[in-house]
Image: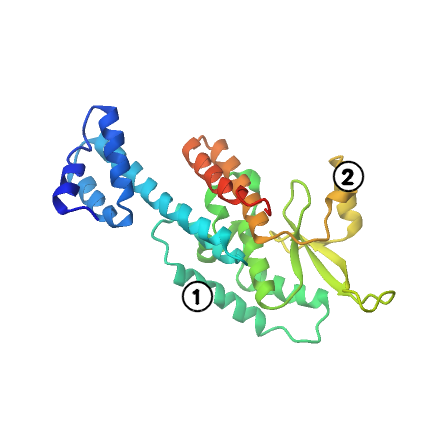
Amino acid sequence: MSSPGEINGLLGLLDDPDEDIYLAVAEKIIALGREIIPRLESVWETTRETEIQERIETLIHRVYFKDLQQDFLDWADSEHPELLQGAILLSRYHFPGLNEAEVIAGFDQYRKSVWLELNNFMSPLEQVHVINSILYRHYHIQGHELAERKPVHFFISSLLDTHQGNTYAIGILYLSLCELLDIPIFAVDVPRQFIFAYIDTVHNYIFPDKEGIPQIQFYLDPSTGVLFNHQDVMAYMKKINAPDQSVMVTPMSARQIMRKMLQELAQCYRYNKEAQKAGDMESLIAVLDRDTGV
């Protein structure tokens, strides 16, 4: 951290009309990290100059986003990135002061509610019925179409708070519950959709020494809990002229899911004419694209 005198000097140059000087000052302020934010907020509160306030707001956003990029990079580089943690990180983009512990505690309430209703003798359909009953009837989760173009519906923290979300926010909640409760429901790569499959592992009777064969029991729309079968998916694939091979039995990874979500959120911001935010999402996608395993 720079000395108080140096910080005061930098803050005193926020109104400099020379763009080059301001950009140099801005980079130095951003490099100070989150510790500078209270000082920036204090200056914002005491100035009446709209231009300075706008500059400060931009700087605060850039400081938060730089911090978020590093955390997102650490998440993507971890050996087994947790999908829920990735979604919480993304929520920090919209809610910079987010209390992550409160989000995790809220999620744990859902987990406990589902766990109490499950037992080891349930069929796949019965397991899904329990999850759907808890999410859509007990907690009254309401799904919103992506076509509504509301960014807030992408964020898991908002979903847990308001019970409103789109297929990605609800889907990540659903997948995270299934992962912790050992229910084999996974996202599968169907073009232009975010849908799940219940994938059982069937014993290989022909080659008993080899691993079991993955078999899809049914598909699921996470925004509504509606189930559909293989024929329904094939009909959709034919409708969009996609090859059958596009329906993969291999589950999508947490990185792949986050990438797909970030692409949709970037499109949402572009539709709302928020180019900077769309660019921020592209920056996060670039973090994932460094790894060819995405």
User: What residue is pinned by disc 2?
Assistant: 243
Indicate which label's residue lies in the foreground, 1 or 2. Answer: 2
Label 1 residue SS? helix
Query: In this picture, is 80 found above or below 44?
Result: below
x and y percentages locating residue 147 in the rendered image: 56, 38
- Outermost top residue: 18
Q: Which badge, 1 or 2, is on the more N-terminal residue?
A: 1
Residue type at mark 2 is Pro
Tag count: 2
Q: CA distance from mark 1 to mark 2?
A: 42 Å
Residue 70 place in picture, x, y as percent: 40, 48
Question: Dot 1 surroundings within 10 Å: few (below 14), some, or many (20 or more)?
Answer: few
Q: Secondary structure at mark 2?
A: loop
Look at the picture and state if 54 lies above or below 288.
above
**Residue 241's x, y, as percent?**
76, 35
The answer to whether one can see residue 159 in this image is no
Residue at label 1? 105
Q: Amino acid at mark 1?
A: Ala
Quadrant of res 129: bottom right
